[in-house]
Image (spheres, grey):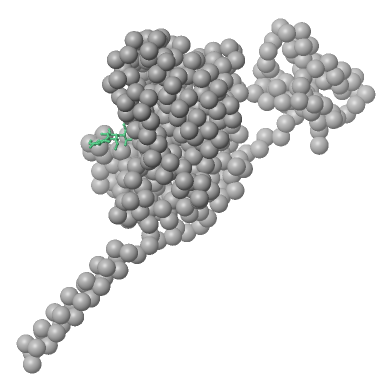
Amino acid sequence: MKRKSFKSLSMALVVFMTATMVFSATVAAATPSGTRLKDIPANGVLVGTEFPSGFNTMSDAATFLNVAKSEFNMVTAENCMKWDATEPSQNNFTFSEGDKLLNWAQSNNFKVHGHALVWHSQTPHWVQNLNASAMEAAMYNHIDKVMGHYKGKIPYWDVVNEAFEDNGTYRNSFWYRALGKSFIDKAFVRAHAADPNAKLIYNDYNLEYTGNKSNTAYNMLKDLKSKGIPVDGIGFQMHLDIQYKIDYDDFAKNMQRFADLGLEIYITEMDVRVPDRPSQSDLKMQASYYENIIKKCMAQPAVKAIQVWGFTDKYSWVPGTFPGRNDALIFDRNYNPKPSYYAMQAALATGPIVHPILYGDLDGSNSIDALDFALMKQYLLGSITKFPSGAGMVAADVNASGTIDALDFALMKQYLLGSITKFPADK
Ligand code: G3I
């Protein structure tokens, strides 16, 4: 009797354990509390992630895609739209993996961020070994064919990726050695011709703070803008690690100077590395990085999208590249939200800080006075091309006509003489 009951107890235990294992293999990830990231009102700022190749055939694809669909509205291909994937041999293009991602994105109302057209990495040897004129022709052909294939379907492209060294010099890549700095200008001009409606982005890492690398990127983009080369945005990749301190105010200041060039800002690949097997305090520290960075982004109207480089720690490039560092994302390996998830949620919810425009205030002094009038005159005479205040170009168009002209000048004069007390642009 004793023996029999032990046996049936063991049987019951086996049945129970098997059932539990089957159940846990199919159970859906826990839904986080609060609002899904993409549903937090953030004035149109898109929230995105990358998808690895094979995203729809992974063993846990259903869970992966359910979480992605709930949380995001933008996606980047981690690898399958890069040169080695799209044009492995010359003029032989394969779009099957990229098309799978695009189709999925279109059926789920995601915007696709294209990554990356001209880069020194993941570009086949046949490109690297070409002479200058053949390399330029190959670059043009690649841009034409890839952007042409996705024309009107991919609204954002990383046209040039990682052209600078961390010390601020131009990267000694095969592009630079063959074509000099001009490969950047040429890539953007060609990309604009290939899809005139796509937003064209320069994307890089370690650009987040002021310093040599970010100064070089700033000067390059300023130069492109001054030459009328079509560049729309800067991509801050934002690959961070809690072992390196961050000056968040410096990040905000740095964003502002790029915004003042008239560029949109994209956070393209955010992740925050922690030690393998992180402590609770590591995860809290990681969350504070996500929160503080994203809060600064929400206060910067030029920021148009915030993307993480993957969302579950199950799939991340980090441990393969940084031994001993890991778990850089916002969901753990079992798709449970981490403190960094809730940090992102809280930061997005701070919403954009909308600064009201004080029309006529061209120097950012918070008043409309003779100095603004003098600045307006200088602008119309062509002796300056922009105003000291970042909002100056908008604030100078006091009749909201879309141009800054003699009528705005006349209205400024009337305002200062007291014959009007507000401008037509004032609501
Ligand atoms: O496709 C080959 C496969 O055939 C081979 O068997 C396998 C063996 O290692 O390698 C596969 O290639 C890997 C590729 O990812 C596709 O999975 C490469 O080894 C691996 O190095 C490559 O890593 C990617 C890395 O870019 C390459 O630079 C990462 O997945 C990807 O997350 C990472 O993403 C970059 C962004 O594009 C640009 N910014 C930095 C970011 C992180 O490095």
Q: Where is residue 289 in the image (x, y as percent from the top left)?
A: 42, 39
Q: Residue at the location (46% across, 42% down)?
A: 102
Q: In this view, does 16 lie to the left or right of 415?
A: left
Q: Residue at the location (68% across, 25% down)?
A: 391
Q: In this rendering, is residue 389 above or below 2? A: above
Q: Position of residue 307 (x, y in %)?
A: 46, 39
Q: In this rendering, is residue 50 above or below 174? A: below
Q: In this view, does 163 lie to the left or right of 347?
A: left
Q: Position of residue 190 (x, y in %)?
A: 51, 20
Q: Residue at the location (29% across, 63% down)?
A: 25
The image quadrant that residue 377 belongs to is: top right
Q: Residue at the location (41% across, 39% down)?
A: 98
On-image quarter of the N terminus: bottom left
The image quadrant that residue 351 belongs to is: top right
Q: Can residue 249 be seen in this view?
A: no
Q: In this rendering, is residue 65 above or below 125? A: below
Q: Can residue 1 be seen in this view?
A: yes
The image quadrant that residue 216 belongs to is: top left
Q: Is residue 166 left or right of residue 236?
A: left
All told, the count of numbered labels is 0
Looking at this view, name the residue that lies furthest to the right: 419
**Ligand 1, image quadrant it occupies:** top left
Q: Where is residue 342 in the image (x, y as percent from the top left)?
A: 45, 51
Looking at this view, name the residue that lies furthest to the front: 92
Instruction: Using the image as rendered, state which of residue 293 and residue 11 is in the foreground.
Output: 11
Looking at this view, name the residue that lies furthest to the left: 3
Instruction: Using the image as rendered, state which of residue 228 and residue 152 is in the foreground.
Output: 152
Instruction: Using the image as rendered, state which of residue 387 and residue 401 is in the foreground.
Output: 401
On-image quarter of the C terminus: top right
